[in-house]
Amino acid sequence: MLAGLAGLSTPLLAQSGGVTAGLAWTVGGGWQVEGADVGYARALHAGPLSVLALTARVGSFIDEGAIVGGARGVVFGVTVAGRTPMAHLADLGADSTATQVGFDLTLEATGYAGSRNPLPVGSPWAAVSPLLGLRVGDPNGAQYALVVGPTVFFGAITQVRPFLGLRFEAPLARQERRP
């Protein structure tokens, strides 16, 4: 058992994987879904995709028109997302420790279930979101992203809403830089 734990803790296994966390909002008038994400992201080199992520989302329904007591019910979701490589725009900082800035495209598919759901899509429902992201960070370390785009809810009815997300990704093991 100790040998198995030692094998799992090696940096080689963790270099292609990382932790991802963030906040997600469906914005607009009326009721919105607001939640927090946490999950696992893995480097993938298959076609146009460079990262595949599996995350869990927990949140609530928020009535943006209410001044007090706008929260209602709980929403749970499981998301599978694929992301393209970052289209590099600029480097910030010194050459040896430059922070990259660029754009990427993420395609998310989420399955939701909620209690006391005020949305007309019913519960459970699914969503698909093509998201454009502005990404900042070290390509071998922590990265931050702001993602925006439409999300299409599929349930009792089909509904399109704007989506806004803040994301953070970090590798599970540090990689040594090569000169």
Image: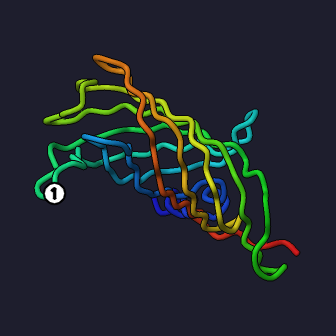
Residue at 16 percent of width and 36 percent of height: 115
Residue at 46 percent of width and 34 percent of height: 151
Nearer to the camera, 151 or 143? 151
User: How far across and down, in percent of the image, does residue 93 sit?
Assistant: 76, 80
Nearer to the camera, 114 or 2? 114
State the scheme by which the image is colored: rainbow
Farthest-out residue, right: 179
Residue at 59 percent of width and 54 percent of height: 17
Q: Is 134 displayed left or right of 116 in the figure?
A: right
Does 11 sit above or below residue 80? below
Q: How many marks?
A: 1
Residue type at mark 1 is Ile
Q: Is 168 displayed left or right of 31 in the figure?
A: right
Q: Quadrant of residue 31?
A: top left
Q: Which quadrant, please, contains the N terminus?
A: bottom left
Does 17 sit above or below residue 78? below
Identify the residue under disc 1.
Answer: 67
User: How far across and down, in percent of the image, does residue 133 sit?
Assistant: 61, 50
Q: Quadrant of residue 135?
A: bottom right
User: How far across and down, in percent of the image, does residue 172 sit?
Assistant: 56, 63
Does 9 sit above or below residue 23? below
Q: Is 42 displayed left or right of 65 in the figure?
A: right
